[in-house]
Image (cartoon, helix red, strand yellow):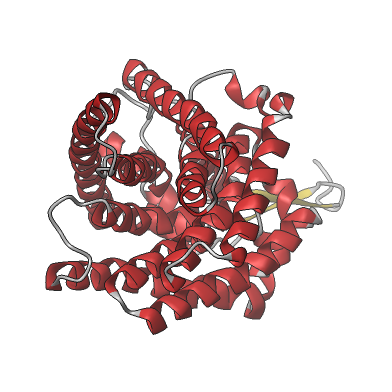
Amino acid sequence: MEDPVLKPQVEVVIDASINVTSQESHAHPIPISNPSQSYILTRLHAGYFRISISLGAQAVLWKILSKPTDESQAFQQVFHMISSTAFHLLWCLALLVLITLSVLYILRCYFHFHLVKAEFLHHIGVNFLYAPWISWLLVLQSAPLIRPKSHTYLVLWLVFAIPILVLDIKIYGQWFTTEKRFLSMMANPTSQISVLGNLVGAQGAAQMGWKESAIFMFSLGMAHYLVLFVTLYQRLPGGNHFPVMLRPAFFLFIVAPSMASLAWSSILGAFDTSSKMLFFLSLFLFMSLACRPTLFKKSMKRFHVAWWAFSFPPTFLALASVEYAKEVKGHIAPAMTLVLLILCVPVFMGLMLLTALNSNRLLREYDPILSSLNELRKTATKPEIAVDK
């Protein structure tokens, strides 16, 4: 007969400190079977609105290019006709894609709210919650039949700008009040999307003539951009949690200064020295990234929605260069604008083609944001075993 004293006692302890998100993820696991409606809703996160941001930015660009000029040359007339047709097609496509993504995301919020909550708690996913509102503001600014000073524009701007301010209060407030969500821990290149939301809203307010509201959103965005830029430049701990697959988001470094130059010129009514300084900063950052293609080598092995970050940042830079060329006389500024257009338009068209060719695999690929939910689910189901000798 065995001595009970020598028999090891094994005690199974289930960790009760699992958070609500983990329990909900276990209760509603992400399906990995064949694509279905539920599968699409669980895989489609706010990061897919990068596509609609790119479409909206291209629509704004072609709207500016399609404006008639004073010259009556045959070449100018043909270019105006082509650019006007391209603008209307792009705007309709941008509106259609944005409506589709918005409807799907609303259904995701209704049927899988626990996944939306997990996005908000994710240090990268939370930044893309600005993307739907940025997309709608860009589509509104490029709308061919809505004038900036009309009542329709005013109402729609309020509908799309107020959620950005609500997110600002929540996210920016956490950056300097919540210990586990300090900016030094949460900062990553996608954090600049929050700044972009404020600057796009500021430009829309300036186009309506709401100068004070435009200055308010501009100052809010730029104050946090300065702190964020320094934090990212110093490579504080938050940058260590950025997946290799999402490295195309480094091009977001050129978004904020480009959009800031456009917003400030809209507020003042002229592309002044401050706007030029911001444009030159954006141009320098763009050249710094373009000269380092090996940085994106690992992220280019297979197509991912993150590739759309290659499209809209150069588009905003091209928009700023168009305004700069209008202000500065000579041949260098127009040539620079032409080069940026030659770069950003083919990249945009190529991404559209790649997305269409990989549409059946777009939601199946590994996603760094969604993988965190699987990790939480595994943590929730793994028991902790303690051995007492």
Q: Is there any visible trace of residue 14 in the rendered image?
A: no
Residue reaching furthest front? 72
Residue reaching furthest bottom? 212
284 vs 304, left or right, is: right
User: What count of labels does the image hold?
Assistant: 0
| Residue at x 40%, y 75% (from the top left corner) | 166
* 181 vs 250, nearest the viewer: 250
| Residue at x 34%, y 59% (from the top left corner) | 133
**Residue 272 vertical position relative to residue 361 in the rendered view, above or below:** below
| Residue at x 33%, y 52% (from the top left corner) | 135
Q: Quadrant of the N terminus?
A: top right
Percent across and percent down for residue 73 are: 27, 29
Percent across and percent down for residue 371 are: 53, 39
Q: Is there any visible trace of residue 287 in the rendered image?
A: yes
Percent across and percent down for residue 377 are: 51, 46
Quarter of the rendering containing residue 292: top right
320 vs 5, left or right, is: left
**Residue 249 vertical position relative to residue 118 in the rendered view, above or below:** above
Percent across and percent down for residue 14 are: 60, 56
